[in-house]
Image (cartoon, helix red, strand yellow):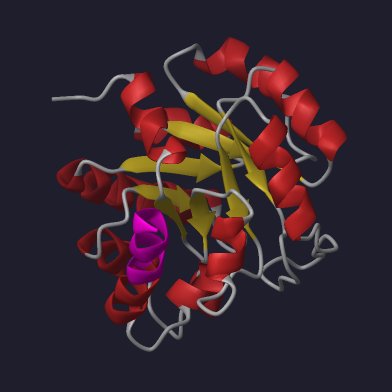
Amino acid sequence: MSLSKEEKLQLFKSYNIYGLTAEKFSNGRSNIEVVKAMLDSGIRIIQYREKYKSLKEKYEECLQIRKLTRQYGALLIVNDHVDLCQMVGADGVHLGQEDYPAKEVRKILGEDFIIGVTTHTKEQVEKAVEDGADYIGLGPVFQSFTKDKPHPPIGIEMVSWVAQNCKIPFVAIGGIKEHNLKDVLEAGAKCVSLVTEIVGSDDISQKIKELWDIIKEFERS
């Protein structure tokens, strides 16, 4: 049975891990291998982010990942590419500050698709909400090196401000590791993304288990 959009968005509002592909940092493993490991370990939101492949390669990988996410009842969000999101039947698209405006993408995708927007400042958060984003990616919380030109860290204080003032769900991302995950949760984040901490781990399943343990312990407390 397919989920409604509101049911899908509930995943962003709950204590959850938001999985991202990053083959460059995956120790020789393919995006497909990493996604399978993430899904096997209970992650139910996958963003396909791939900067270094051709459009055809991205399309073919997304088809495989879409098949996997359907098997596991998980969401697939495509980074940047609105057309790729449509072609593979993804659940939504994630837009950066240099991508098309969310309100214009909404005209193309319609209301059933999820639209996320990367934000670094209070003004960008407010603009994303105004433009009709369904969730925001907030970061980098700490220093991050997954992008060629990383944005300066926004800090824990910004996470707290968004947790208290933003009307839509947010995903905290950027430099989050096992050792500082609790700090991000204490600041008010529920949905978190730990990119290299997961994809670069020697044992992805064990690493995700350790992260879930921290999240569940915090939730209980």
207 above or below 144?
A: below
Q: Quadrant of residue 76?
A: top left
User: Does the rendering let one see residue 119?
Assistant: yes
Which quarter shows the C terminus?
bottom left
User: Does the rendering let one see residue 90?
Assistant: no
Q: Which residues are magenta?
A: 212-221
Q: Position of residue 182 (x, y in %)?
A: 53, 67
Q: Identify the residue at the far bottom of this view.
A: 202
Horizontal arrangement in the rendering, residue 88 relative to residue 107 (left or right): left
Q: Quadrant of residue 183?
A: bottom right
Horizontal arrangement in the rendering, residue 208 relative to residue 138 (left or right): left
Q: Which sits in the foreground, 60 or 96?
A: 96
Type of secondary structure dominating the magenta stretch: helix
182 above or below 5?
A: below
Q: Position of residue 69 (x, y in %)?
A: 26, 46
* Residue 95 lies in the magenta stretch: no
Residue for point 58% across, 39% down: 94
Which quarter shows the N terminus?
top left
Residue for point 27% across, 68% down: 37
Residue for point 75% across, 42% down: 161
Q: Which sits in the foreground, 22 or 2?
A: 2
17 above or below 92?
A: below
84 above or below 211?
A: above
Q: Position of residue 142 (x, y in %)?
A: 73, 68
Residue for point 43% across, 83% down: 201
Q: Position of residue 149 (x, y in %)?
A: 82, 65
